[in-house]
C-alpha cells in the first residue's frame, strides 16, 4: 500500500510557484543610513539615533537588508534609468537630468509586460521634463519633472489632472487604488516618491510632520571638517562648499523620510489586506545617496560614500528568509535582471547588472562582483567629471583633466574618507589596474555629449 502511495505521488505533476508580483519603491535622495535599523546597528557612530522609521524597519525585519548597495552614477535621472535598464549610463544614454527616457528602451517593465505582466508607474519619474505615458508601463499616474510638494498636477495616462494634498500621499493613494483592482495577471509596479528631495520643510511638508523631531539633535561625523578635494574656500568666510551640516536642515530632511516611511507602511498594509504579501517582491531603495554636510557638501554628485550608497531592502516571503543581512556589493543596475530572473524570464546579454536572487536565497555565486565602476559627469555645481572604482574595502577616484585631484581611500581603516592615499603607489596601483580592466570590459568611454548647461532641475 505504501508503495502505491509513493508511486502516485511521483506521478503527480509538480506545481510551480506562481509568478510573483513586483512592487518597486524608489525614494529621491534617501541616504543609506537614514533609517532606524541602520542607526541602531551603528550605535554611538549613528548620526540620527532617534530616527523613527517603523515601516522601513519592518521591511528589513521581514526580508533582506543589503548593507552595501550603491548607484553607478549619483544623480536623479541616471540613477532611475540604471534601475530601469540594468545598464551603466554611458550605454543607456541617460547621463544627466535633462534628457527624456527613450520610449523604445528595453527595461524590466517592457520585458515583463511582454511576459504577460500588467505594469504601472506612480509618482516621480524625472527624466528631464518628459511628459505623457511612461514608456513600458500600461498605466501611469506621474508628474512632470520635479513636480511640487503640495497639490501637484499629475498626468494620468497622459491626461493632466489636479490633485489635492501632499504629493507622496497622492502617489500612494493612486498606487493603492490601482492595486485593489481585480486582474487575472501578475503585476509589476513602481512607486516613485518625491521626498526627501530638496525644497524641504515648512509648506512642503504635510502638517502632521511639521513639528516631528522637534528638539532632536544630529551627531557630528569626522568628515564634516574634511572638504571635498575640488572645493575652494569662500574668500569672504574661509569656509568650504555649501554644506548641509545645520541641524534644522537635518530635521526637515528626516521629516520627509518619516512621511515616505508612513506611505511605505500603507503600501505594505494594502498587500496584507489583499492577501498579496506572500507572492509579492517588495524592493525599497533610492535613486542616489545624499550629503548632509560631509566633506562640506550638500546634494549628491560625487563619488564619496554618502553620495554613492543607498538603502536597499527586499522582501519576498515565498522565497527569501526574513531578517537577512547581506554584505556583498549590489548595484542599481542589478534590479532589472533580478526581476526578470524571479519571473523566470531570460536576462538580455546587454544588461550589465546581475541577479541578486542567489544572494537572497543563500546561494552566493563564486564569481560575485568584488568591485564596480562609478562616475559622475559635471552638470551642476562644482564637482568635476570623475570616474572611480569602489571595492569592498577601498576606492580610487580620477577627475577628468585634474590629475592633482586624484583620491584614494582605505575604507576598512578610513570609512569617512579623510586620509587621501593617492600618492601611495603600493595602494593605488592594483586599484588602477582593476579599474582599467573593468572599464575595458564595459567599453567605457567619456560621453561626447556632456552638457555644458546647468540642469533644469536639481
Image: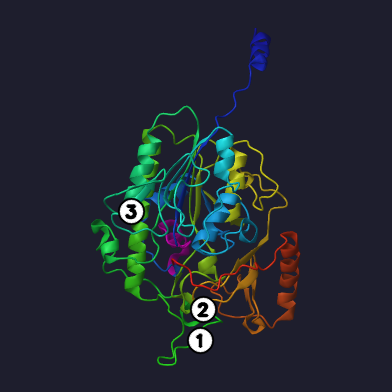
Q: Secondary structure at mark 3?
A: helix
Q: Secondary structure at mark 2?
A: loop
Q: Residue at x 50, y 63 (%)?
A: 97
Q: Residue at x 33, y 52 (%)?
A: 153
- Report the predominant secondary structure element of the magenta stretch: helix
Which residues are drawn in magenta? 30-44
Tell me: residue 207, above or below residue 242: above
Q: Are marks 3 and 1 in contact (CB under 8 Å)?
A: no
Q: Which residue is mark 1?
A: 232
Q: Which residue is mark 3?
A: 167
| Residue 39 falls left or right of residue 430 | left
Tell me: residue 31, above or below residue 141: below
Q: Residue at x 55, y 37 (%)?
A: 113
Q: CA distance from mark 2 to mark 3?
A: 30 Å
Q: Quadrant of the N terminus?
A: top right
Estimate the x, y position of residue 10 in percent, counting from the top left: 67, 17
Mark in the foreground, 3 or 1: 3
Q: Which residue is mark 2?
A: 382
Toward the viewer: 93 or 304? Answer: 93
Q: CA distance from mark 1 to mark 2?
A: 9 Å
Q: Earlier in the sequence, mark 3 or mark 1?
A: 3
Amino acid at each position: 500500500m505504501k508503495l502505491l502511495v509513493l508511486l502516485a505521488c511521483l506521478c503527480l505533476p509538480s506545481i510551480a510557484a506562481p509568478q510573483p508580483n513586483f512592487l518597486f519603491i524608489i525614494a529621491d535622495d534617501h541616504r543609506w543610513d537614514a533609517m532606524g535599523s541602520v542607526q541602531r546597528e551603528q550605535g554611538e557612530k549613528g548620526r540620527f539615533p532617534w530616527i523613527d522609521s517603523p515601516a522601513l524597519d519592518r521591511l528589513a525585519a521581514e526580508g533582506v537588508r543589503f548593507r552595501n548597495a550603491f548607484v553607478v552614477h549619483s544623480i536623479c535621472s541616471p540613477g532611475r534609468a540604471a534601475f530601469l535598464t540594468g545598464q551603466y549610463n554611458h550605454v543607456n544614454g541617460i547621463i544627466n537630468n535633462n534628457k527624456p527616457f527613450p520610449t523604445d528602451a528595453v527595461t524590466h517593465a517592457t520585458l515583463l509586460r511582454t511576459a504577460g505582466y500588467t505594469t504601472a508607474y506612480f509618482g516621480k519619474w524625472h527624466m528631464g521634463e518628459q511628459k505623457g505615458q511612461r514608456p513600458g508601463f500600461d498605466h501611469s499616474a506621474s508628474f512632470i519633472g520635479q513636480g511640487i510638494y503640495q497639490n501637484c498636477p499629475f498626468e494620468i495616462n497622459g491626461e493632466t489632472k489636479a490633485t489635492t494634498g501632499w504629493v507622496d500621499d497622492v502617489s500612494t493613494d493612486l498606487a493603492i487604488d490601482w492595486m485593489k483592482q481585480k486582474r487575472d495577471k501578475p503585476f509589476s509596479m513602481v512607486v516613485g516618491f518625491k521626498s526627501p528631495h530638496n525644497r524641504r520643510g515648512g509648506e512642503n511638508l504635510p502638517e502632521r510632520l511639521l513639528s516631528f523631531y522637534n528638539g532632536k539633535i544630529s551627531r557630528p561625523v569626522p568628515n564634516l571638517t574634511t572638504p571635498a578635494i575640488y572645493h575652494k574656500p569662500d574668500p569672504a568666510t574661509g569656509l568650504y562648499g555649501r554644506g548641509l551640516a545645520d541641524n534644522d536642515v537635518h530635521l526637515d530632511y528626516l521629516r520627509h523620510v518619516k512621511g515616505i516611511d508612513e506611505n511605505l507602511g500603507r503600501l505594505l498594509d494594502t498587500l496584507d489586506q489583499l492577501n498579496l504579501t506572500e507572492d509579492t517582491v517588495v524592493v525599497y531603495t533610492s535613486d542616489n545617496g545624499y550629503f548632509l554636510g560631509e566633506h562640506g557638501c550638500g546634494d549628491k554628485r560625487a563619488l564619496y560614500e554618502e553620495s554613492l550608497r543607498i538603502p536597499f531592502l527586499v522582501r519576498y516571503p515565498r522565497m527569501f528568509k526574513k531578517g537577512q543581512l547581506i554584505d556583498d556589493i549590489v548595484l542599481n543596475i542589478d534590479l532589472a535582471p533580478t526581476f526578470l530572473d524571479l519571473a523566470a524570464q531570460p536576462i538580455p546579454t546587454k544588461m550589465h547588472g546581475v541577479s541578486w536572487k542567489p544572494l537572497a536565497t543563500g546561494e552566493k555565486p563564486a564569481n560575485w562582483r568584488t568591485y564596480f565602476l562609478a562616475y559622475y559627469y559635471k552638470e551642476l555645481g562644482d564637482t568635476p567629471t570623475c570616474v572611480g572604482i569602489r571595492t569592498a574595502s577601498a576606492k580610487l577616484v580620477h577627475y577628468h583633466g585634474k590629475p592633482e585631484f586624484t583620491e584614494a581611500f582605505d575604507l576598512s581603516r578610513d570609512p569617512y574618507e579623510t586620509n587621501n592615499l593617492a600618492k601611495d603607489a603600493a595602494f593605488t596601483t592594483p586599484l588602477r589596474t582593476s579599474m582599467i580592466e573593468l572599464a575595458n570590459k564595459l567599453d567605457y568611454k567619456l560621453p561626447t555629449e556632456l552638457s555644458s548647461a546647468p540642469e533644469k532641475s536639481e
